[in-house]
């Protein structure tokens, strides 16, 4: 090359280097001035960001790097040596110096340095911009179409490298959970070359991915192709719409599943063009319901045989055999009449809450007041109409006392008889503090009692304190009573303890009526006056009156009279004949003397000597066991 051309080339290079240094210094000053009035902003990629919320993001700002205060820009010389050829040798090998800036060195006066975004590399790193799907009242929603930003200035072709870049647009939402708000999560990613030439075919791909955990239903992808880009073919085939959009029904996408749409296009003119894509879908909200079923169960463990009057207890276990928690559990026990509790006939116990498999025990302490089988009705109830029922049987062993009253074979009014009480314990347990009581019927009178029996006149009864009667033991008590009148009589006997009467007996008897003969004797003088002082040789009358004061007729009533030696019988007046022999008069028996009636005998006698004379009268009857004997005394004076 001629040396002249080399010199021209060197001059041009020097001019260009000076203009470049001047331009850099001017641009740096302008940026420093802007930085002084505007706070630093975060770095954002120069590539356009598209959101589905309908909000236009801020324009991309240049990368801002803060330089330490001590740094200072100093000019640097960039030197490049020409090849050592003939031209260089002619020029003397002088290097060409290019003036620039270098941020090396330290100084107290710092400043902020703003640098331009570096040119793209051979392949652009994939970047994802976030957007939230528009949510409505339902589970589904339609993603809004992206809103494009103004086209940026076209970068020089020399600053681009012929490489393939990837650009992604994402749709995000909250993670799908079993509870709380649920939003769909989907991403849309464009994969395309970073450089395309007008008139040259190329292929771009749209990748739709379900990045959430819930299934997306009815997904439809729409693409709006610019007018300066010719659409040659799509795979799969698109469904065009009236608005010029291309639609692809994607169906349902499960979590992690993707759909890919391939578009073969041919740009018609240079410049930045925009392929806009939107995604509409119906999202599924998953609601996981943990349905548990609580339960209640009762198990009863009763004590062994209890004794009357003793404490007994029942152990009740309330459990939850179900899979859920039983709330507000209450145990209710209904007691029979033979069991007593301090809370009354209905005992309520608050159990509270029972977790699955949990159980609690409740002890019911009661007093047995009656013998035999005592059933306890148990119910356990809880929230949600939970109910469990059971029955606890308590066997109370009570003494079996048997009482028998033995009466005389014949009860006759006015006569006494022995009445015997027989008390026997036929049970399996002993009984203590036993008392026997005999209530006298009307018309009977108490005569005596054995074994310490005492007569209570106010209650007209005879009472014995028996004490303890062992199982199988028998004891007897005797009371002597006198029947006062004839007729039907009811005898009541009972055996009592501290818990009341355990045995009772009743005996009905018939009291037969009886004749009751009485003698009335008197001495009647000749003038009719009664008196016991007579004169010797005086005639007097002995009056004998037999009266039946009983309730029954006195049958076969016979009388005999024995006169003293100094008294001579003159005449006899009476209802029956007599026989006199050696001063003894025996009268024929009267058939009967009715109740309340009387028979009168008059004996006329004469006293032949002075002194005291006694006449003995004897009356007997078939209705009386013993004869009635009377004596009449008379004083005879000389």
Image (cartoon, rainbow, N blue to C red):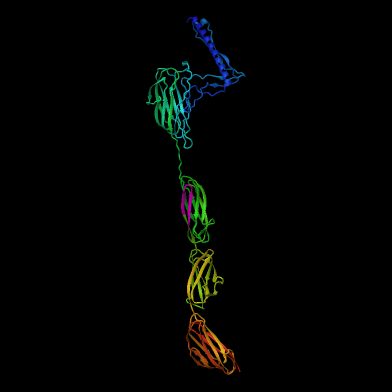
Magenta stretch: give its range.
Answer: 375-390
Task: From this view, report whether residue 135 is shown above or below residue 440.
Answer: above
Residue at screen point 40% across, 30% down: 250
- Quarter-of-image position of residue 282: top left
- Queried whether the magenta region covers residue 131, the answer comes back as no
Name the spot of residue 373 as percent of width and height, x first.
47, 60
Name the spot of residue 508 as percent of width and height, x first.
47, 72
Q: Is residue 594 visible?
A: yes
Image quadrant in which the C terminus is located: bottom right
Tell whether 41 sits left or right of 387: right
Tell whether 306 sits left or right of 257: right
* Extreme-right residue of the structure: 108
- The overriding secondary structure of the stretch rendered in magenta is strand
- Queried whether the magenta region covers residue 378, the answer comes back as yes
Q: Is residue 67 visible?
A: no
Residue in the foreground of this view, choosing between 590 and 25: 590
Residue in the foreground of this view, choosing between 450 and 115: 115
| Total tally of numbered discs in the picture | 0
Name the spot of residue 365 as percent of width and height, x first.
53, 56
Task: From this view, report whether residue 72 is shown above or below residue 565.
Answer: above
Residue in the foreground of this view, choosing between 575 and 476: 575
Name the spot of residue 138 as percent of width and height, x first.
45, 35
Residue in the foreground of this view, choosing between 171 and 109: 171
Task: From this view, report whether residue 94 is shown above or below residue 603.
Answer: above
Task: From this view, report whether residue 534 is shown above or below residue 158.
Answer: below
- Quarter-of-image position of residue 186: top left
């Amino acid at each position: 090359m001629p040396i002249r051309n080399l010199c021209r080339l060197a001059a041009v290079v020097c001019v260009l280097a000076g203009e470049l240094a001047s331009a850099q210094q001017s641009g740096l000053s302008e940026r420093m001035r802007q930085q002084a009035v505007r706070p630093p902003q975060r770095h954002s990629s120069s590539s356009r960001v598209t959101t589905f919320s309908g909000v236009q993001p801020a324009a991309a700002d240049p990368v801002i790097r803060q330089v330490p205060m001590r740094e200072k820009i100093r000019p640097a010389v960039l030197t490049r040596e020409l090849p050592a050829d003939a031209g260089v040798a002619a020029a003397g090998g002088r290097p060409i110096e290019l003036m620039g800036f270098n941020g090396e060195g330290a100084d107290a006066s710092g400043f902020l340095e703003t640098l331009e975004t570096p040119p793209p590399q051979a392949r652009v790193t994939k970047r994802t911009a976030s957007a939230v799907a528009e949510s409505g009242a339902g589970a589904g929603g339609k993603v809004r179409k992206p809103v494009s930003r103004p086209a940026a200035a076209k970068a020089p072709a020399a600053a681009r490298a012929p490489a393939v870049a990837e650009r992604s647009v994402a749709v995000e939402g909250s993670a799908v959970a079993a509870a709380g708000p649920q939003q769909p999560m989907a991403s849309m990613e464009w994969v395309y070359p970073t450089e395309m030439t007008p008139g040259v075919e190329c292929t771009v791909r749209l990748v739709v991915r379900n990045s959430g955990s819930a299934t997306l239903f009815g997904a439809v992808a729409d693409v709006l192709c610019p007018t300066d880009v010719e659409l040659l073919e799509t795979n799969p085939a698109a469904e065009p719409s009236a608005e010029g959009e291309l639609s692809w029904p994607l169906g349902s996408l499960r979590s992690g599943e993707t759909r890919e749409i391939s578009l073969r296009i041919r740009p018609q003119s240079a410049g930045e063009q925009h392929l806009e894509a939107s995604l509409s879908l119906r999202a599924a909200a998953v609601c996981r319901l943990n349905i548990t079923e609580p339960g209640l169960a009762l198990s009863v463990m009763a004590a062994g045989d209890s004794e009357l009057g003793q404490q007994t207890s029942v152990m009740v276990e309330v459990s939850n055999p179900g899979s859920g928690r039983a709330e507000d559990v209450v145990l209710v026990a209904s007691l029979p009449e033979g069991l007593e509790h301090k809370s009354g006939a209905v005992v309520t116990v608050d159990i509270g809450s029972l977790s699955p498999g949990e159980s609690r025990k409740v002890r019911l302490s009661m007093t047995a007041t009656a013998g035999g089988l005592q059933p306890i009705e148990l119910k356990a109830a809880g929230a949600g109409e939970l109910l469990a029922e059971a029955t606890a049987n308590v066997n109370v062993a009570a003494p079996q006392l048997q009482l028998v009253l033995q009466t005389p074979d014949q009860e006759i009014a006015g006569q006494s008889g022995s009445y015997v009480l027989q008390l026997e314990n036929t049970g399996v347990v002993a009984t203590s503090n036993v008392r026997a009581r005999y209530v006298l019927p009307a018309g009977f009178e108490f005569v005596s009692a054995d074994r310490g029996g005492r007569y209570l006149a106010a209650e007209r009864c005879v009472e014995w304190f028996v004490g303890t009667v062992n199982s199988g033991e028998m004891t007897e008590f005797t009371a002597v009573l006198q029947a006062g009148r004839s007729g039907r009589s009811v005898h009541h006997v009972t055996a009592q303890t501290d818990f009341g009467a355990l045995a009772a007996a009743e005996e009905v008897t018939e009291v037969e009526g009886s004749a009751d003969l009485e003698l009335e004797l008197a001495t009647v003088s000749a003038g009719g006056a009664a008196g016991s002082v007579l004169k010797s040789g005086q005639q007097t009358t002995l009056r004998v009156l037999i009266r039946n004061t009983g309730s029954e007729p006195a049958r076969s009533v016979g009388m005999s009279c024995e006169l003293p030696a100094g008294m001579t019988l003159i005449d006899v007046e009476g209802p029956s004949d007599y026989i006199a022999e050696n001063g003894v008069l025996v009268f024929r028996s009267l058939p009967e003397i009715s109740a309340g009636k009387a028979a009168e005998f008059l004996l006329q006698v004469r006293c032949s000597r002075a002194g005291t004379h006694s006449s003995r009268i004897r009356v007997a009857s078939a209705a009386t066991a013993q004869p009635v004997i009377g004596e009449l005394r008379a004083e005879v004076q000389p």
